[in-house]
Image (tube, rainbow, N blue to C red):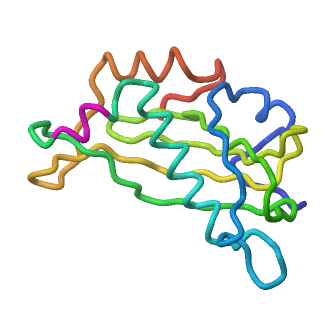
Amino acid sequence: MGKIGYITDMKEWMEEFSFSFPVKVRFSETDMFGHLNNTVPFTYFEQARIEYFKSLGFMQDWVDTKNETIPVVADLQCDYLRQVFFDENMNIMVKAASVGHSSVDIHYLGVREDGTPCFVGRGAVVQISRHTGKTVPWTEEMKETFAERSPASMEKA
């Protein structure tokens, strides 16, 4: 495995996750070689990210059409560490690595049941106005919620 820019120490980085979302690899998510298709972790990231935001109490407001703000994914990447196969049980771990004015850097970790990491990722999510498309700052309450549920090493962007 080569160096991954957003991970300084893999063991320490992995220990900072507390939220997880279980997935089971479906047959339709594999390619002709029986491997998890390289696009599927992005779907897993989406599922886990939504559940993470629900657990923080944010998603419920964002899906309310009367609410001014919505989240958008500004960038997303995945680094593949090990092969994943049909019918494997995985846990997709999610954490906020840093919180900015209106964005949050979300980190992801896809692990087997035995804790073996298979893929990792990160992406920026930005809160915007659903009407203007312009960024909207996190409220102090939202920043506090991120901080309470995030690793001690979380950076303020």
* Residue at x 58%, y 23% (from the top left corner): 150
Q: Position of residue 40 (x, y in %)?
A: 63, 66
Percent position (x, y) of residue 93?
66, 38
Q: Nearer the viewer, residue 85 or 4?
A: 85
Q: Residue at x 20, y 41 (%)?
A: 69
Residue 36 sits above or below residue 156 on the image: below
The main secondary structure of the magenta stretch is helix
Residue 129, position as x, y percentages in the image: 17, 46
What residue is drawn where x is 51% and y is 48%?
47
Query: Bounds of the magenta span?
Result: 60-64
Task: Answer above or below: position of 95 versus 148.
Answer: below
Q: Is residue 155 or residue 21 the one in the foreground?
A: 21
Quadrant, the N terminus: bottom right
Q: Residue furthest bottom?
A: 32
Q: Quadrant of residue 83?
A: bottom right
Q: Is residue 110 magenta?
A: no
Asked if the stretch drawn in magenta spans residue 63, the answer is: yes
Q: How many marks?
A: 0
Whole-percent x, y for residue 31 in the image: 74, 80
